[in-house]
Amino acid sequence: MGHVIVGGGLAGARAAEALREGGYRDPVVLLAGEGHRPYDRPPLSKEYLQGSADEGSVWVHPADWYREHDVELRLGTAVSGIDRAAAEVILADGRRVAYDRLLLATGSSPRRLPVPGAQLDRVHHLRTLDDSASLRAAISAAARVAVVGAGWIGMEVTAAARIAGAEVTVLEAAEAPLLAALGPKIAEVFAGLHREHGVDLRFGVQVTEIVGDDGAATGVRLADGGVVEADLVLVAIGAAPNIGLAVSAGLDVDDGVVVDERLRTSDPRIHAAGDVANIPYRALGRRLRVEHWATAYYSGPAAGAAMLDAEGPGYDQLPYFYTDQYDLGMEYTGYVDQSEPVDLVIRGDLVGREFIAFWLREGRLVAGMNVNVWDVTEDIERLIRSGAVIDAERLADPEIPLSEIK
Ligand SMILES: Cc1cc2nc3c(=O)[nH]c(=O)nc-3n(C[C@H](O)[C@H](O)[C@H](O)COP(=O)(O)OP(=O)(O)OC[C@H]3O[C@@H](n4cnc5c(N)ncnc54)[C@H](O)[C@@H]3O)c2cc1C
């Protein structure tokens, strides 16, 4: 029979790699809904979108890799169901593929704006390589861009559109960009960055309609009746996990497919990894579904190893992600729920955007974010994992090397 992976994204491709590296010799089938072989998505809102990197830079593996490793990559193959009793997946064309173990690596999909006009031409979403190629062409032809949603993708596309010379208006329901992830003080750093680059940021607004002419968007109407004119609208209001297969198969689902540390779902023959998986984070003492590149990069192979019943501690990464906007580069390690009481400690120059932000709960580090400061992720991770109460004054003092903080 063999092992079957549904979803040809980063998590799926890395799982296939781990199966072969783990010595698995039976068939490995990778069922990929898209027509492209697995690729990395971060460049799609950054270098690739800006035109400074080409398609060659995005692939997870070279084209030959799948044949050389005897991984049967079936592109354009959507899975429509799982027959757990027969241990088979059902393809959209009705054919079936039997599995010994199955991995769900189906990722997530952009949320749609539930307003009239959302289907018009010139309204874009960004998830796939094809989305990015068409958005890139649209940005180069656009004079005025409206970005709905000031999350990571919205802000990265905003930067790309400004770099391309378009006027950009950002429309966000919250009072700041990236608020849920960063809290008000650090969110203001990103708001300031975009304002300095000439972006019109509008917070606390509700989009009620995308207005158009002749089938194509010409602007965005807000709840106060005003219209922001635009010849390109990007809707970037987050993503939802692709849980349809898991739900209809009766697997446990709770904000993603619930898995244990071995990435096993409630059916021990079925695993899940990447954006779609709700994973227990031992070092944080909580479950999370993390929609970031590093989660797919590490949980895919962890699932592959678990499909081989490999010994080991299971998945034990901390959440990690990064962004690049204009000349700001940032890495973020750990997790903080901004609705809980946390203390924010800054080391470095917040105004000059060269700093590390630390979030502490009851004196213990839960997350750290370095902005235009590099090579500190290991120390941040060490401090989070230690669980020790940290002297906030020493943490804030750039004269004391981070490596000396305990
Ligand atoms: C534009 C963009 C920029 C990003 N930038 C960053 C960044 O800077 N930093 C960062 O940390 N993260 C970033 N991310 C997030 C990161 O790319 C994702 O977390 C990562 O792609 C998740 O990988 P995955 O393999 O779990 O899912 P995906 O990459 O979504 O792959 C899942 C695949 O499964 C396929 N699929 C779904 N259902 C089926 C089915 N039924 N049958 C067959 N195939 C199916 C989908 O078509 C898709 O190809 C970005 C994401 C996007 C979209």
Image (cartoon, grey):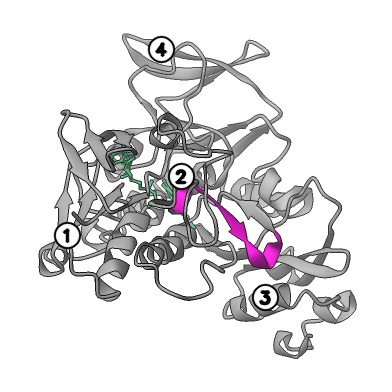
Residue 55 in view here: yes
Q: Nearer the viewer, mark 4 or mark 1?
A: 1
- Crowdedness of circle 4 by 10 Å Cα count: few (<14), some, many (20+)? some
Label 4 is placed on what type of residue? Gly
- Tell me which label, 4 or 1, sits earlier in the chain: 1
- Tell me which label, 2 or 3, sits earlier in the chain: 2
Label 3 is placed on what type of residue? Ile
- Tell me which label, 2 or 1, sits earlier in the chain: 1
Residue receiving disc 3: 380
Q: Nearer the viewer, mark 4 or mark 3?
A: 3
Residue 269 as seen in the image, left or right of residue 241? left
User: How far separated are the C-alphas under marks 3 and 1?
Assistant: 41 Å
Q: Secondary structure at mark 2?
A: helix
Residue receiving disc 4: 212
Instruction: Name the image quarter holding the N terminus.
Output: bottom left
Residue receiving disc 2: 157
- Crowdedness of circle 3 by 10 Å Cα count: few (<14), some, many (20+)? many
